[in-house]
Image (cartoon, rainbow, N blue to C red):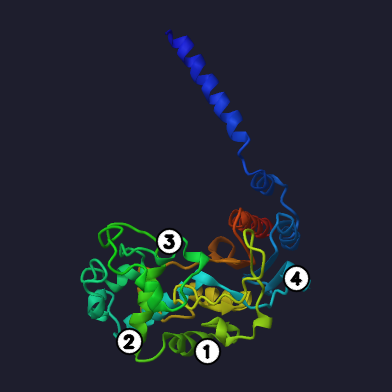
Amino acid sequence: MTKKKTKRIVQIILLVGTITSMFFVPWILVKALITPLPDTVQEQVNDAIGYRLDGMIVYVDQAGKEPAFYAAGWKDREKKIQADPHSLFKIASISKLYIAVAVAKLVNDQTLSLDKTLADYLPGLKGRIKNADKITLRMLVQHRSGIPNFTDTPGYWLDPPKGNRENLELVLDKPADFEPDKKYSYSNTNYLLIGEILDKTLGYSHHQYIKEEILKPLGLNHTYSLLSEVDLNDVMSGYDVGFDGDLKNYDFINPAGSMVATAEDVGKFLRALNDGSLLNDNEQTIYSSIYEYGHTGLLPGYSSIARYHKDIDAVVVEFVNTSGGYSWNLSEIAYKRIVKILRRENT
């Protein structure tokens, strides 16, 4: 076969592949991406609801401007209650930021050591968790432990265990995903274990420590460690595209993602974490060495994004009460477009 014929065949194969792939493109995502950017954040929030998201809350804290609140869609779809930007929301894995801050503070005052191992802190797990005598607290915080993620258990979200011990049982005596500190792999089990270490070391609940040392000093009166601490009427309902009903009552109590807060409170916390007003210099240095300065969260019925954007000195928090399908992709697209609008306003 000549080179010319071979090249032509390759071109045909590529063309057929392109045409075929077009039939499987999620056009809803393409449309969300290519639609012209609206003039305002509120218009973008309104537009996002048109892509099958039930409700959205956005909080923007930009330097030199008053904090801004945006909402669209439903707080409660069945009762036809419109989204309220001041509603409480399950912030899921954004909770890990608060846990990491607690670790940094306790390491600074020498209550904890980043170099002590899981076996040092929780000796009962030696022999039950692979490499417990090699996995340090630092590795747990940084998701470099190799411990399997309990939420990756097949069928986990169909009937998830509630208690921390029941969740931990899902990974006990299982092989490690990799040797400690050899790579990064996000695992909720890491933060379940950090919560256990904090409780044992403190001699009381880490929830109380976070309240006294983080929430109260910042005046965060609308942030809670557990869903059971709040009036459910104040919480935004949650929906999944594969489930017909409200997921608000589902209570996830694990330290990996149990917290409930308003977008404003999350924004205030994130601002303080990033501008240095939450931690002293030594604590800030420790924190910078172990964890990130923004986060996302995902639970059945709830997705969230909270990040600080240095170039425009803005904290942007987005809550969406829909999960499943393309909802996460759409949430990310909407978030990026909101940040683009804010950047455009600053030019």
The Cα–Cα distance between marks 4 and 1, rounded to whole angstroms, is 35 Å
Quadrant location of residue 3? top left
Q: Earlier in the sequence, mark 4 or mark 3?
A: 4
Identity of the residue drawn at 59% across and 31% down = 20
Amino acid type assigned to the residue bearing label 4 in the image? Glu
Q: Nearer the viewer, residue 69 or 2?
A: 2
Amino acid type assigned to the residue bearing label 3 in the image? Asp
Quadrant location of residue 73? bottom right
Q: Is residue 284 visible?
A: no
The Cα–Cα distance between marks 1 and 2, rounded to whole angstroms, is 22 Å
Q: Earlier in the sequence, mark 1 or mark 3?
A: 3
The Cα–Cα distance between marks 1 and 3, rounded to whole angstroms, is 35 Å
Label 2 CA crowd tier, 10 Å (few <14, some 14–19, many 20+): some
**Residue 71: % across, % down:** 72, 68
**Residue 173: % across, % down:** 27, 67
Q: Which residue is mark 4?
A: 78
Q: Earlier in the sequence, mark 4 or mark 2?
A: 4
Q: Is residue 265 visible?
A: yes
